[in-house]
Amino acid sequence: MARHKQIKTEEQEDPEMNISSMIDCCFLLLIYFLVATSLVSEKKLDISIPASTQSSSSQKPPVDPGRIVLRADGSVTWNGDLTVGDAYDPEAQPGTSEYRSQRELDQLVEQLKNYKDLATSVQAEPIVMLTGAPSAPHQRIVDIMAALAEAGIKSVGISTADPDAQ
């Protein structure tokens, strides 16, 4: 008769996974994204687009629409002759005074408020036409829309024509 040896095997413990390093990585990523995210608050843009249908009366509005021109370099002009914003520098770092000063279009806001006061004095709605170059920085358009919202102008027409070619 053959004898069979019984070999005792050690019972193995359940495998464990140490996740503390993964939690550390998650916290580091969370901190990175919190710090790297710019904390610029945009203003609410409550703007309506004027109707494109022609009214039956051919009466000219008492106040001409205001005209904002955005050039390809990011400079902004009001009514074709007054420069109210310098060229946009995309290299400016968020959080610096240079970045804040080029984003705030104080001269434009002042002109828009004057225009709104003029239009309301003759009981007309202030209408502004924004003409921008197709290669203009999109951030500059947002800055102009914020200036319009700050001035309280809600009727805005937008066109994308190259103002330098005219």
Image: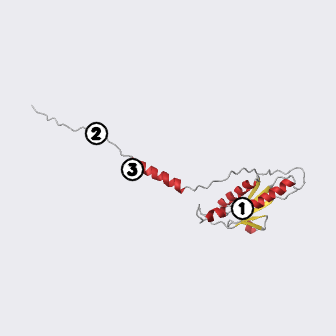
- Which numbered marker is on residue 159? none
Q: How many residues crowd around disc 1 within 10 Å: few (fewer than 14), some, or many (20 or more)? A: some
Q: What residue is drawn where x is 84% and y is 55%?
A: 119
| For residue 2, side relative to residue 56 (left or right) | left
Q: Quarter of the image holding residue 133?
A: bottom right
Above or below, 9 against 95 in this view is above
Query: Looking at the image, which residue sits at the far top?
Result: 1
Q: Identify the mark nearer the N-term, 3 or 1.
A: 3
Q: What residue is drawn where x is 16% and y is 35%?
A: 6
Residue position for label 3 = 21
Residue position for label 1 = 106
Q: What residue type is disc 2 on?
A: Glu
x then y, percent, for residue 146: 70, 56
Q: Secondary structure at mark 2?
A: loop
- Verify CB contact (< 8 Å) between mark 3 and mark 2: no
| For residue 80, side relative to residue 4 (left or right) | right
Q: Identify the mark nearer the N-term, 3 or 2.
A: 2
